[in-house]
Image (cartoon, rainbow, N blue to C red):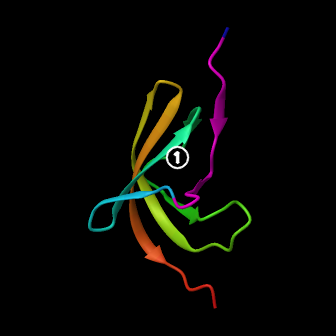
Amino acid sequence: MGMPFELNTLIVTKGNEVRQQGNQFTLKKDGYRLYPIDIPIEVRHTIESDYRATAKIQKVEWENNQTMITYQLLALHSSN
């Protein structure tokens, strides 16, 4: 039986991101997920929320049916 993978083209935080230092954050998601690395990607609070930030993912780690991403926030966008 293969491992189910989900391909994600944006980061959805649901408020679960953890600031590490400066503009660097980590986010843990259930399941195994693929993300593009080292290119700008959208960050949203929820899948339906307005586009609110741009980040660059630096690292993706898979362990115990969870995915941990480390990303650098590049820009915040006003919701106005």
Residue occupying image coordinates x 48% and y 78%: 76
Q: Amino acid at mark 1?
A: Pro
Counting the numbered discs, the total is 1
Task: Measuring from the top left, give residue 19's x and y in whole percent.
Answer: 34, 61
Residue occupying image coordinates x 68% and y 74%: 50
Report the magenta residues as a range.
2-15
Hey, which quadrant is residue 1 in on the image?
top right
Residue occupying image coordinates x 33% and y 67%: 23
The residue at which mark 1 appears reads as 36
Residue farthest along the front direction in this orientation? 15
Q: Residues within 10 Å of mark 1 (few under 14, many from 20)?
A: some
Residues 16 and 58: in front is 16
Residue farthest along the left direction in this orientation? 21
Give left or right: position of 4 versus 24: right
Residues 11 and 41: in front is 11
Task: Measuring from the top left, give residue 20's x and y in whole percent.
Answer: 29, 57
